[in-house]
Amino acid sequence: MHAESQIREPLILGNKTYSQITDDIIKPVEGKTGKAWYVLFTIATLTFIWGLGCLAYTIGVGIGVWGSNNGVDWAWDITNFVWWIGIGHAGTLISAVLLLFRQKWRLGINRSAEAMTIFAVMCAAIFVLFHTGRVWLDYMLFPLPNQFGSLWPNFNSPLLWDVFAVSTYFTISLVFWYIGLIPDFATIRDRAISPFMKKFYSLLSFGWGGSARHWSRFEEVSLVLAGLSTPLVFSVHSIVSFDFATSILPGWHTTIFPPYFVSGAVFSGFAMVLTLMLIVRRIYNLQAYITVKHVEYMNIVIIVTGSIVGVAYLTELFMSWYSGVEFEQYAFLNRATGPYAWAYWCMMTCNVVSPQLFWFKKIRTSLVATFILSIVVNIGMWFERFVIIVPTLCRTFLPSTWNMYHPTFVDIGIFTGTIGMFFFFFLLFSRYFPVIAQSELKTILKISGEKQKKDAEAHSHSHAPAH
Amino acid sequence: MAGVITKKVIHGVYDDEVPLLDACRKLKAAGIKVKEVFSPFPIHGIDPIIGVPRTRLAICAFLYGLTGCGLATLMMWYMMVSDWPTDIGGKPSWMYIYNVPAFIPITFESTVFCAGHGMALTYLLRCMLVPGARAKNPDPRTTNDKFLILLELPEEKTGEAEKVLRAAGAIEVNQKGTVTEKLPY
C-alpha cells in the first residue's frame, strides 16, 4: 500500500471508520435540514426571482434598459460573464489538475468545487446569451445549416471560439461531476429507508454496484477526463482573454492576457471555494473532512495565483510605459487616475495587497480571516474585470465619443439574480447530493486518517531496531 | 439437464480490503476463479489477482478525439474555405492552410468534446450504467463499508473455497443459492 510521511498532517480527523465516513457525509441528505439552510435558501430564491424579473424586463423592453451605451457598449454583462467563468475554473483545477498531481487533499473539496464550476458557468451563460439582445436568436451562434445564404459564423473570431470553449467546458465538467457522483448515489440508495428516496437515488445511481471491473473503468475514465479537462480549463480562459486581446484597443491589446486571465480565474475560483466550504463545513458538521489544513492549502494557492495576478498588473503598467505608444500609456493612466480610479485602487488593494496577508500562518489558518479575505478577493476580481472593460471603453481614441457608464437597476438586478441563482442551486445540491466524494475519500482513510496515522507511527516505533 | 451445469453461489464478506486481497491471492493459488469483487471504493492492485484485464477505454477516448479533430477540421474547411470563402481582417481563407492558426482553438475544443463525451458514454454503456438499471451489487452493504468476493463454483469445490475464505478473515461466508450455466459445447 501507498505510505505517507508522518510529517504530513492528517486529512481526515478523529477516529473514523469507513461506515462513519458514510454516515457523516450522507446524514445531511437523509436527515432533517437545519434552520440555517432554510433561511439561506429563502434569501437565494427571492434574489433569483428578482433576477428573473429583470431578465424578463430586458426581453420585453430590449437591452436599452441596461446602462450600456454607444461608447461603453460592453460593460456589466461581460464583466459578470468573465467573473463567473473565472470562478468556475477552480472546480476543474481542484478535480483535474490536482488529480494529475496526485494531491490527496483535493478529495475533501472536489465534489463541491465541481458543483460550483457547473453553477458558475450557468450564471456566466446567462450574460452571454442575453447580451446578444435577441436571446431567441441565440441559436445563430452555432454553425447550423440555414436559409440565409448559407451564412456561417466567423471561425476567425474569438467570440465564436468562446461559444465552443464554454459549451465544451460546461458539458465536460457536468459529465465529470456526474460520473463521480454515481457511486455515491448508489451508497444513498443502498441505505435509503423511505421508498421514495430509494426510487429517486436508484434512478440517479444508474444501477452502480461497485464491482472491480467497474472501479477499474471508473478510475480510467476519471484519469482521462482529468487529462482532457486540464488543457481545456486553460484554453477556456485563454479564449475568454482573446475576446479582448485580439482587439486593437489600447489596454486590451496585450499578449499577457491569457496567462494573466487564467491565474486570475484560479485565484477568484479558490476564493469562492473557500467561501462555500467554510459555510458547508459549518452547516453540515464536516469539520473532520474539510480541515484547517485544507483551508491552508487553498490559501497557499491563493498566495501563488494572487501574486501572479499582481505581477501581471505591474507588467502591464511597465509595458504600457515602455511601449512608447501614447494611447497605450493613456489607457493605463486613465485607469489609475481617471473617472474610475476608485475601482482601480479597489482592485489593487483587494487583489494585490490582501492575499499577501496569507504569508502569516496565523491568518492563513484562521477561518474567520480566511472567510473575510475570500470575499474581499472576489470583490477585487470583479473590479478587475470592470476596470479592464469600462474605463477602457469610456476613453477610446476619439474624445467626442468619451462617455461614462452607470449601471441601471436592471443591470444590478440581473447580477444579484445570478448570485441568487448560484446559491439556489448550490444549496439544493448540498441538501440532496453528497457534498464530499465519500467513496473516493475512503481510499485515503488508511493513509491520511488521524487515528490510522497515529497507529502507523506507534507501530513503526515498536518495530524500530534497537541500537 | 443435458448441456447445463449448476453452480453454487458463495459470498465471502470482509470488512477491510487487506484480508480480501489476501483471500483473492489464496483462492487463485488454490485454482479457484473469483467471479467478481464488490467494494465501496477502488481497491488498487486487485485487477491482476482476480484476472480483470486492463480496460481499453483510453484507446476509445483517443479514437473519439481523433474523430472530433477530423470533424472540426472538415466543418471549418467546408464553411470557411469551400462554401463561402471570405477575406476577414486581411486574413483570406482561400485555402485552409492560410488560416489554420485561427482554426486551432475550435479544433482543440472539438477534440476534447468528442473524446470526453464519447468516453463517458462508452463507459456508461460498457458497465450498463443507465437510468433505471437494477443495482448490480448482490449485497447493499458493499457500497458502505463491506467488501465482497463472489464465487460461482461446482458443488464439489465449495467446501475448499469456504475454508480459504474463512482462513483469510471473512466475517461472513454465505451460500446464496445456485445458478445454471450453459456448457460451451
Image (spheres, coloured by chain):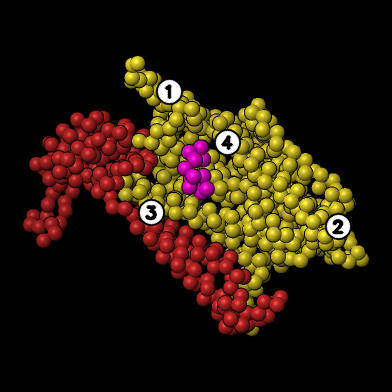
Chain colours: A yellow, B red
- C-alpha distance separating marks 4 and 3: 36 Å
Residue denoted by label 1: A454
Query: Which residue: 58% across, 36% down?
Result: A297
Q: Circles 2 and 3: CB distance less than 8 Å?
A: no
Residue denoted by label 2: A330
Q: Which mark is residue B129?
A: 3
Residue denoted by label 4: A297
- Amino acid at circle 2: Tyr
Tag 4 and tag 3 share a subunit: no
Q: Which circle, 2 or 4, is nearer the viewer?
A: 2
Can you see residue B65?
Answer: yes
Q: Which residues are magenta?
A: A95-108
Query: x%, y% of residue A92?
Result: 55, 49
- Dot 3 falls on a residue whose secondary structure is loop
Q: Chain of mark 2?
A: A
- Dot 2 falls on a residue whose secondary structure is helix
Query: Which residue: 60% across, 50% down?
Result: A89
Q: Chain of mark 1?
A: A
Near mark 4 (Cα within 10 A), the count class, few <14, some 14-19 or many ≥20, is some
